[in-house]
């Protein structure tokens, strides 16, 4: 909201450079990286973290569209690859989840389509970081940015809503039970199931459904689907 901006181009550090995922994305070449004065990840990280700390050294909330399934994950993966710890006081907010509530009944919730619907203009250089950030700021401003609300997650904690069929209402039910991340949910299930096996054989599928409904208080029609989704995708070695 201050109008301050940051941008940096990072050389991925490997060759050959892959082609773009589609024609919507820029073709990254050595010439392009050179023209943008690209730096390695460590230098890019140093500049970015310094820019963030210029404005706050306490709680920081990083907002991105589809943050919990894209930006946050990539940020964590690339930092881990280079052994750079993310600050524990950095939190992440997903504007996609927020916009679904703040701007209801849209045919599409992509950043471009939301921006076009609100402004009547296309995002110039769509899928480029700084133009997309400017567009997102415009969208959030038009939805009253000072009254934004929704879940935030710290570094290394995965959003509960990545679980298929687990929406905002079920997420709130888990929060009320003190379960504040996917890792915490999975650990609770694995720990509880392991303890139950000390006494007698328990069917895993039945246990997870009972844990979701009785321990977590998710008694909606989605509870069975949520249980299956956890078993099929999120439990280790299953």
Image (spheres, rainbow, N blue to C red):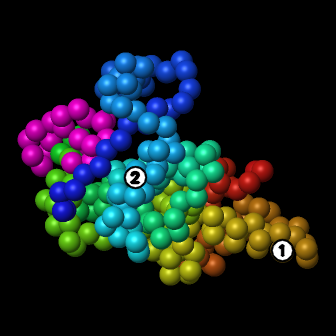
Residue 151 magenta-drawn? no
Compared across the picture, whether 204 is left or right of 170 comes to right
Tell which residue pokes out farthest to the right in this image: 199
The one of 19 and 229 positioned closer to us in this rendering = 19
Q: Quadrant of residue 230?
A: bottom right
At x 23%, y 41%, the residue is 131
Q: In the current view of this chain or complex, which residue is farthest to the left?
A: 120
Residue 166 seen: no
Q: Is residue 1 visible?
A: yes
- Horizontally, residue 144 falls left or right of residue 30, namely left
Q: Position of residue 29 (x, y in %)?
A: 41, 19
Marks 2 and 1 in Cβ contact (< 8 Å): no
Q: Position of residue 202 (x, y in %)?
A: 83, 67
Q: Secondary structure at mark 2?
A: helix
Q: Which residue is mark 1?
A: 196
Front residue of 70 and 61: 61
Query: Is residue 130 inside the magenta stretch?
Result: yes
Q: Nearer the viewer, mark 2 or mark 1?
A: 2
Image x and y of residue 28, in percent: 40, 23
């Amino acid at each position: 909201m201050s109008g301050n901006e940051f941008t940096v181009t990072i050389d991925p550090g490997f060759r050959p450079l892959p082609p773009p995922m589609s024609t919507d994305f820029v073709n990254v070449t050595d010439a392009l990286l050179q023209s943008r004065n690209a730096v390695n990840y460590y230098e890019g990280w140093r500049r970015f973290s310094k820019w963030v700390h210029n404005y706050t050294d306490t709680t920081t909330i990083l907002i991105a569209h589809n943050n919990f399934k894209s930006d946050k994950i990539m940020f964590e993966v690339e930092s881990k690859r280079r052994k750079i710890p993310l600050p524990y006081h950095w939190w992440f907010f997903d504007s996609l989840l927020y916009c679904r509530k703040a701007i209801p009944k849209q045919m599409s919730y992509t950043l471009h389509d939301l921006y076009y619907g609100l402004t009547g203009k296309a995002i110039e250089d769509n899928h480029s970081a700084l133009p997309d950030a400017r567009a997102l700021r415009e969208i959030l401003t038009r939805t009253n940015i000072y009254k934004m609300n929704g879940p935030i997650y710290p570094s290394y904690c995965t959003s509960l809503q990545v679980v298929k069929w687990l929406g905002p209402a079920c997420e709130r039910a888990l929060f009320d039970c003190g379960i504040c991340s996917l890792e915490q949910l999975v650990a609770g299930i694995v720990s509880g199931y392991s303890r139950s096996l000390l006494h007698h054989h328990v069917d895993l599928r039945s246990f997870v459904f009972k844990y979701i409904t009785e321990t977590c208080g998710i008694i909606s029609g989605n509870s069975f689907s949520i249980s299956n989704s956890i078993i099929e995708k999120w439990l280790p070695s299953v």
